[in-house]
Image: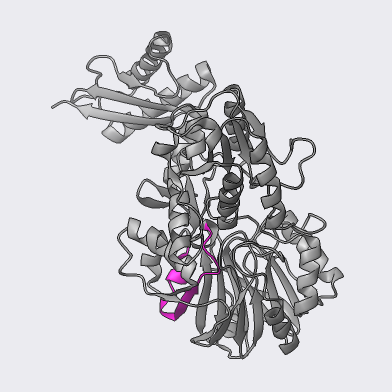
Amino acid sequence: MALDDDFRRAMKGARDLVFLPLGGSGEIGMNLNLYGHAGKWLMVDLGVTFGDPRAPGVEIVMPDPAFIVERRDDLVALVLTHAHEDHLGAVPYLWPRLQCPVYATAFAASILRRKLSDVGLAAKVPITEVAPGARFKIGPFDIEMIYITHSIPEPTALAIRTSAGTVLHTGDWKLDDRPLVGPATDDAALRRAGESGVLALVGDSTNALREGHSGSEAEVRAALTELIGRCRQRAIVACFSSNIARLETVAVAAMKHDRHVGLVGRSLWRMYEAARENGMMLDLPPFVDESDASFIPRDKIALVCTGSQGEPRSALARIAADDHPHIALEKGDTVIFSSRVIPGNELAIARLQNGLVRQGVELITEDNLPPGLSGPIHVSGHPRRDELAQMYQWIRPRIAVPVHGEARHMQAHADLARSCQVPHAIVPENGMAIRLSEAGPEIVGRASAGRLALDGEALLPIDGPIFRSRSASQWNGVVVATVVVDRKGRLVGDPRIAAPGLIDPESDQEFLDELAASISETLARLGPKADDETIEQAARKAIRRAARDVRGKRPATEVHLVRLP
């Protein structure tokens, strides 16, 4: 790792505090943040993000923890701020490399245990449940979990106190006086932290470009209740499965209009079970299983579906493709997208919504609300500019460190912090080691901050040879040639060629013949002393030359040489 002497000195000093993000800075998703102090490391969050175009065929991507894996003897713990996938989704895959204690609230622990059970780690990962508002010590770190508001139960900010100063790590948050599930933000605890002195605020930047306030879940409940009442047949609501308040809202709205509520999608059921396990949603009628929902009259059912981000294997994607085993749409049904578009998912969501419209259903999104609706059908779980300004008024840090956003979001956050009289602001990048001190932030080194893709059951680096080859094959195709020669290197029969993704064997016989002829002509010029490696390289060059001349492509090429005795 490219770390300089200042970094090494900072890690040893009891008066030094280092912040090092390995994921979640310059992007929305796959959060992994490290705090270094007195020779020890504290990890905050370990999440995933959606598939990366550089890794064809992959749906889950996560940060590469190689830096901290090399130092895992000094890693005191992983603390999870809340249960969203981009904050804890990588734990089942990466914990075996870290082998550290995990601290989480009861709800986050419930979600995590279900994920760990899927990979056989439920009994191996030491999880300590911490109540929001509690304060505890891990190594040289004194941590207070402060209840905040977000779009999932039990979100927390972390006041991380050290001998070098206090950091407020906000996690994901917003201000909502009527969150419907759980209490409102504990502004008294935030004020107390600010009054005692905060060195740095490391905070959510998702909505830093948006003016005003994010809005309340109570407003959404009023709007969805009215909207479901307008539906003539089935009402299908697409939302994030983790938004327990939104699930409760659909249930309350459906009951008001004499409808049952069905959940369609495994993740919805898991969130519902975790919520009930932690004392939530106990006063609601049971939800209907998707297999039973099809037997209920269409004007007496409301369905909640996963897939609001266009995920290809989600329940809503299968419904839109008319490929779901239990749920089929008809003209007159209404699909309501009670969610926002996460940057990067625009094309997938557009494809999904177009597929729904082709089935004749009415599609309602934030962009085409029916006239006269009383409020929004979705509010963000992240703070807009007025909320960010309020947080800075409470905390009054010496340093602002925007995270959880693309570069444009983080820069806007830094500019806003300066306008709130914060003396110093720095926009970090993944892998940037930043010393935090009263004098301001200082970059003291850089660590590798790659990405790992879950490819089947293997974790592979996105910038590694497998995905480079796969990406090249996706653009240029593949040619595989089997060449049989005798012991003097002379061809025995015509080369056998397959070219998936480049050639249609039913209509491109002429091109196949040209490839075979190019190989034959090239090998004929080699002579009897050519060894196997020379023959393979010559055949490979002949294939690529012919493909370039005829098709303008440079395919990935493999030559299988068989030499007869």
* Viewport quadrant of the C terminus: top left
Residue at the (51%, 55%) spot, across then down: 284
Q: Pinpoint residue 408: horizontal percent, then vertical percent.
A: 74, 54
* Residue 134 vertical placement versus 50 (above, below): below
Most distant residue in the left direction: 565
Among the 4 quarters of the image, the one containing residue 97 = bottom left
Q: Is residue 77 magenta?
A: yes
**Camera sees residue 437:** no
* Quadrant of res 438: bottom right
Count of marks placed on residues = 0
Q: Tell me: 464 left or right of 346.
A: left
Q: What residue span does the magenta drawing correspond to? A: 65-84
What scheme was used to colour the molecule? one colour
Q: Quick check: 448 above or below 489?
A: below
Q: Position of residue 482 (x, y in %)?
A: 28, 24
x 58%, y 91%: residue:
14
Q: Residue at x 68, y 81 (%)?
A: 189
Q: Is residue 332 left or right of residue 407?
A: left
Q: Give coordinates of residue 402: x percent, y percent.
A: 70, 66
Percent coordinates x, y for residue 20 in the rendering = 59, 71
Above or below, comparing residue 550 to residue 139 in the picture:
above
- Residue name at image x 79 percent, y 54 percent: 210
